[in-house]
Image (cartoon, helix red, strand yellow):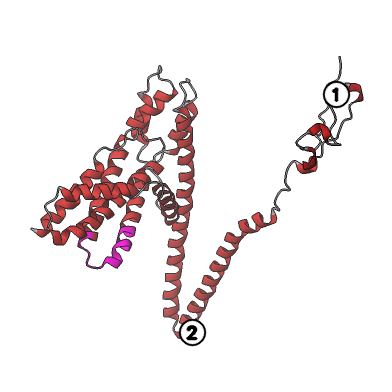
């Protein structure tokens, strides 16, 4: 059996070789066949295949930067607390004891909050993993691949308020269901009560935010007001779905919510607010503030719905219909009652 010839590097011709009449150029040679036994092989130059990999020192230094800054901050705070306690003891022992007790209580509260935040961050990562597995199962009609996901759901929500409803839905699964039908069934029935509770929470906070912004005489505090209500709403939604509501959890969840909202245009919020105002009986003097209030309420509603989507362990099949319209009408109704 004849050996397969090796690859040969092509020869680049200078621009002069591309003349009007190639036969008149001195580099021009007629095509001819070369026997394989007389062909010359050219070794491949592997130095041009891939660019050199970037140094890893910068990546490692960035990884150690956050822990180092955190350690420096903790040391600085500890030094200041030690100086404060020493100063209070020098004035009076009772004052020093009071400052020491307050310091211990503060450290205990901060430790509990950090622990809850780390637990909530870990739970958010687990929820994201469950969502990815469920999304993959929704794309196939196999049988038996969802068993591992069901086991993970039972373990994850064993000590939460979702345990009974989830276990009841898993028990009622039909053995003839494929993996896609199992995920669809659980998404509609295993989280039904939690979804209703979270949606009522979104509606309540959205209406309250819209009314407060519409009636607030200080426009500069509107954004702070909306941010405060959104953080409290996100905290309650995380609690509904069994996620520890620490400050770290709220910050991470709020970051993900804002990233998702960045892809949604503000034109939809403006259209919903305009349609609500057109059908209202508000006076012209209050219509401008009412428009701002409805816009703030709808922004809070979209923030809450996005938080529900991120906290749910399973993809949401049925979007809540008419919730934004109900929020707009609720804001207009309360503002109309205030003006009467």
Q: Residue at x 32, y 61 (%)?
A: 223
Give above or below for 174 relative to 94. Answer: above
Q: Is residue 265 above or below residue 6?
A: below
Q: Position of residue 12 (x, y in %)?
A: 79, 38
Q: Earlier in the sequence, mark 2 or mark 1?
A: 1
The majority secondary structure of the magenta stretch comes to helix
The local secondary structure at tag 2 comes to: helix
Residue farthest along the left direction in this orientation: 340
Residue 292 in the image, given as x and y percentages of width and height: 25, 57
Magenta span: 214-228
Q: Is residue 161 magenta?
A: no
Q: CA distance from mark 2 to mark 1?
A: 103 Å
Q: Nearer the viewer, residue 204 or 10?
A: 10
Classify 10 Å Cα crowding around label 1: few (below 14), some (14-19), many (20 and above): few
Image coordinates for residue 99, horizontal then vertical, percent: 43, 75
Image quarter in which the C terminus is found: bottom left
Residue 32, labelled with which disc? 1
Q: Residue furthest top?
A: 1
Relative image position of residue 26 (x, y in whole percent):
86, 36
């Amino acid at each position: 059996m004849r050996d397969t010839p090796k690859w040969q590097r092509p020869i680049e011709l200078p621009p002069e070789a591309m003349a009007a009449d190639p036969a008149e150029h001195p580099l021009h040679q007629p095509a001819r066949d070369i026997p394989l036994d007389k062909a010359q092989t050219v070794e491949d130059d592997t130095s041009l295949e891939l660019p050199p990999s970037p140094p890893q020192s910068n990546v490692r230094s960035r990884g150690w930067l956050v822990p180092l800054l955190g350690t420096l901050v903790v040391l600085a705070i500890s030094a200041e607390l030690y100086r404060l306690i020493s100063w209070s003891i020098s004035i009076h022992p009772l004052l020093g004891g009071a400052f020491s007790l307050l310091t211990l209580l503060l450290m205990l509260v901060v430790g509990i909050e950090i622990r809850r935040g780390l637990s909530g961050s870990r739970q958010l990562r687990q929820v994201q993993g469950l969502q990815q597995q469920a999304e993959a199962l929704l794309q196939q009609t196999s049988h038996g691949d969802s068993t591992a996901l069901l086991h993970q759901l039972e373990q994850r929500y064993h000590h939460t308020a979702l345990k009974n409803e989830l276990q009841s839905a898993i028990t009622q699964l039909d053995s003839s269901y494929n993996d896609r039908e199992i995920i669809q069934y659980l998404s509609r029935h295993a989280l039904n009560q939690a979804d209703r509770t979270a949606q009522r929470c979104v509606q309540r906070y959205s209406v309250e935010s819209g009314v407060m912004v519409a009636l607030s005489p200080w426009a500069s505090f509107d954004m702070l007001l909306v941010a405060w209500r959104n953080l409290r709403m996100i905290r309650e939604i995380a609690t509904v779905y069994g996620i520890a509501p620490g400050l770290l959890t709220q910050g991470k969840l709020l970051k993900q919510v804002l990233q998702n909202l960045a892809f949604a245009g503000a034109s939809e919020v403006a259209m919903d607010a305009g349609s609500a105002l057109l059908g209202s009986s508000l006076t012209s003097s209050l219509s401008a503030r009412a428009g701002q209030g409805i816009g703030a309420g709808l922004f809070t509603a979209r923030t809450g719905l996005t938080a529900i989507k991120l906290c749910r362990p399973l993809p949401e099949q049925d979007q809540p219909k008419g919730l934004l319209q109900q929020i707009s009408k609720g804001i207009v109704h309360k503002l109309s009652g205030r003006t009467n």
